[in-house]
Image: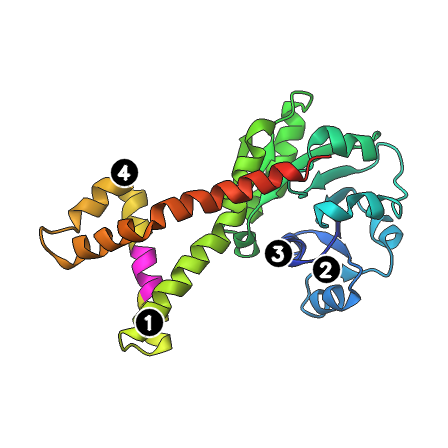
Amino acid sequence: MKIAIIGCGNMGSALAKRLSLDNEVFLYDRNKTKIDHLQSQGFGISCETIEEALKEAEILFLAIKPQSLEKAVENFNLKPSRYTIISLLAGINGSTLKRFFPSQKIVRIMPNLAISYGDGVVAVEEDKEMSSREKLYIGQLLNPLGKVYWISEAKMNAFTSLAGSGPAFFLTMIETMIESGIAMGFTSQDATDLTIQMMKGTLSVLEKSEKHPAELKWQVTSPAGTTIAGLAKLEETGLRNSIYQTFLAAYNRAHEFKT
């Protein structure tokens, strides 16, 4: 399959790395250094212009910043109905996209950074006009990126916050845990290894046991022990509410992108 990716920042680059394994991928970004670097690694073909990237493509992944949409569209010369446009633009709904691309089929998705390794989660907005055959086609295209979820438009911004922005918040917590390990005397490498393995093991237990996180938490919390002392401090410092507010802030920001 011939695919164009317009916008090769972190997410566009992640798409290129995974999709180029089984497809012919054409890349365009205003920063040519990015796409030249991807090409040098074997992840797609660097193009000088948007028109060149679109010349032979059947699928167009739109991975630019939401704020740049209107300006970017000025450089598009799309043949009516030829392309399926797959948009990664956070907060830009289908109606807005249709205004810019009235003749093209539009699919709205939201992946996260783990798609680089095929372990991501990808939300695809449900479309009542999409046939079962088209749905199967899109699903097969996206499956190499990770687990695909079909969700309603109303939940896209929530998914963006929880699964799209979530890795950044999760990594910040991991970073803090590593720094705590260093403060307690571990080397940076040892603290990193211990934290990552602890996370892997905990997530494995959570997934395989099918128990609620709270139930598992209390299994490792002894009366008057070290864990309950740490949990008490966690509540005292308001970490739980901070996490809640963090995800809500990302969710609300996604709503602000609507035009």
Q: Where residue 172 sits in the image (x, y, percent)?
A: 44, 59
* Amino acid beneath label 1: Ala
Q: Where residue 230 sits in the image (x, y, percent)?
A: 22, 57
Location of mark 2 (residue): 44
* Amino acid beneath label 4: His
| 160 is within the stretch colored magenta | no
* Amino acid beneath label 2: Gly
Q: Left of 223 or right of it: where is 23?
A: right
User: How is the rendered protein coloured?
Assistant: rainbow
Q: How many discs mark residues in the rendered view?
A: 4
Q: Earlier in the sequence, mark 3 or mark 4?
A: 3
* Quadrant of residue 189 within the rendered picture: bottom left
Residue extending furthest toward the front: 236
Where disc 2 sits, the SS reads loop
* Amino acid beneath label 3: Ala
Magenta segment, principal secondary structure?
helix
Residue at the (31%, 53%) spot, across then down: 237
Judging depth in this view, the residue of 219 and 47 nearest the camera is: 219
Q: Badge 3: few (under 14), some or many (20 or more) residues near its Cα, within 10 Å?
A: many
Q: Where residue 59 sits in the image (x, y, percent)?
A: 75, 42
Mark number for residue 14?
A: 3
Q: Which residues are magenta?
A: 195-201
Label 2, label 4: how many angstroms apart (C-alpha)? 43 Å
Label 3, label 4: how many angstroms apart (C-alpha)? 32 Å
Residue extending furthest toward the left: 223
Q: Nearer the viewer, mark 2 or mark 4?
A: 4
Q: Earlier in the sequence, mark 1 or mark 3?
A: 3
Dots 2 and 4: beta carbons under 8 Å?
Answer: no
Dots 1 and 3: beta carbons under 8 Å?
Answer: no
Dots 2 and 1: beta carbons under 8 Å?
Answer: no
Location of mark 4 (residue): 212
Residue at the (27%, 78%) spot, across then down: 185
